[in-house]
Amino acid sequence: MERHRWIVSMGAVLVVIAGTFLPGCGGGSSGTKTPPPPTPAIQNINSSTTPTSPVSLPIEINGSGFQSAPGQVVFTQGSISASVTPAASAWSDTGIVAVVPTGNGTTDFTVPGTVNVTVLTSGGTSNAVTVNLVATITFNPSQMSWGTTTALPVALTGLRAVAVPGATSASAFAIVAGGYNGAANTNTVWSNTLSNTGTVGSAWNTIITNPLPTTVAHHAMAEADPTNSLVASGKAYIYVIGGQTLPTDVGGTNAVYLASVDPTSGQVGTWTQSTNSLPQALMGASATVHNGYLYVVGGLDMNGNPVTSVYSAPVNSDGSIGTWTTSTNVLPKAASFGEMTVFGGIIYYIDGDPNASIPPNQQFVGDTDVYYAGTVRGVVGPWTLNGNLTIHDRAKGILFTAYGQFISAEGVYTGSVGSGEMETAAVNGQNTTNVALNAWTGLTGTQTAGANVYNAAAFTSPLFAPNTNGPRFLILGGQGLTGTSGAGGALSSTVYVNTAP
């Protein structure tokens, strides 16, 4: 999920995001008469139906007639107007990356609220597109405490889950799909309401009429809605990507399944297999939707070997997936079961298992690598090894992001059980000296959930907690961590949620 994963300042990160992706459109015209410059036109912002952003983060403006040299991007809210001149590396005839200003230098924009965005060039002023400005808060992971909510109907590992925004700003749904029950992989799909305290409803709804078309575990899962893609207003879609069909399989599949989710009831519609399959069979891959594109990174190939692959595909207005692009900027090191997200225009791949032919339900430690790259309109730039690696060599873990804080958690790692359950790092807004994330700090005691599982599902809720406006993180199922190799412990049905801040 990308929703509610924001920071307050990005600074020079804009150059990282845009420099590789927005080449200028040069060239002059021959003859004695120069045609007038075109009037700029904005097609969309963030490749989203309902573009949403906090201040001080970059947005992607897509359209035509912007010309090759930078003009201005104008942000207007009532009587407040602020003009931004992006760097040349962030401007092209069809695309602009610009940081949303806090205001005009004298008066700040009202947040939450809306702002109208126009592009100004020598050809005139473009049409206006509205961006929803959302609030951010200071969030300190060391203030977390944890509890539990309604357990899953069955203990599972290798399951995946996403949160889908509801029809109102106060509603959302948790959707769980697939997993291994100790005897076989399943095709089960569950849905439940999600409250602004992070708790789920008193009973999980089994989607009896629309289970997954096949059994699957260790797949990737993502969701698309109008705030992160061009799907129609009032629509939402979920994706199950690759994964292991049978528990004896050493590799995954290249199938991509999608289904609609009713934002008023959480009911999951009929699953269909995308005609655009993954370019290769994968399990243990990571996926997310960001600014209109589905990204898939890493995983195990059909022979059980980790890969460096990075793929992206556009999300169409009907939820279908377009043609996959294979990035030439692959991961620097092959890995599977890593933690991946896109945050503020930067894609991160954290930890992961570099080892081959390790059965996915088995325990085996990963590495401490943190890689990041700029990404704009589905194009991923060169990867950089972050100057601060994680503390623990985590594999098969989970990742939460909120308000510029990353929490890497659970999984298999070196050390006694619980000693490295959770660690946190903050985004470095200036991205200085190859440090997109600052130093990692371990969380201990009541700051952690005490789940001690690997191959669990997890997501950040799209809803704010009341009073504190704190983010809510959920951990679902998984297998008990017992060591660094071999079979793990009992499968879990427990659902953990942080109760503070």
Image: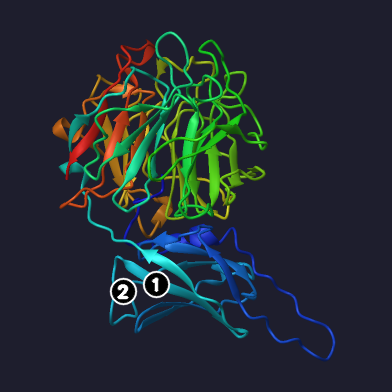
Residue picked out by circle 1: 115
**Label 1 CA crowd tier, 10 Å (few <14, some 14–19, many 20+):** many
Quarter assignment of residue 443: top left
Residue at disc 2, secondary structure: loop
Q: Which one is earlier in the sequence, the residue at label 2 or at label 1?
A: 2
Residue at disc 1, secondary structure: strand
Front label number (2 vs 1): 1
Q: Residue, x 39% and y 19% (percent of image)?
A: 157
Instruction: Give the image location of residue 269, x and y in percent.
Output: 50, 35
**Label 2 CA crowd tier, 10 Å (few <14, some 14–19, many 20+):** many
Residue picked out by circle 2: 109
Colour scheme employed for the rendering of this structure: rainbow
Instruction: Give the image location of residue 310, x and y in percent.
Output: 58, 39
Whole-Å distance between the Cαs marked 2 and 1?
8 Å
The reply to whether discs 2 and 1 touch (Cβ–Cβ < 8 Å) is yes
Whether residue 369 appears in this view of the structure is yes
Instruction: Give the image location of residue 334, x and y in percent.
Output: 55, 31
Q: Which mark is residue 313?
A: none
Q: Amino acid at mark 2?
A: Phe
Q: How many marks?
A: 2
Q: Quadrant of the C terminus?
A: top left
Judge whether 49 appears above or below 333 on screen.
below
Quick one: which residue is furthest to the bottom in this view? 32
Nearest the eye: 340 or 243: 243
Q: Is residue 59 left or right of residue 111?
A: right
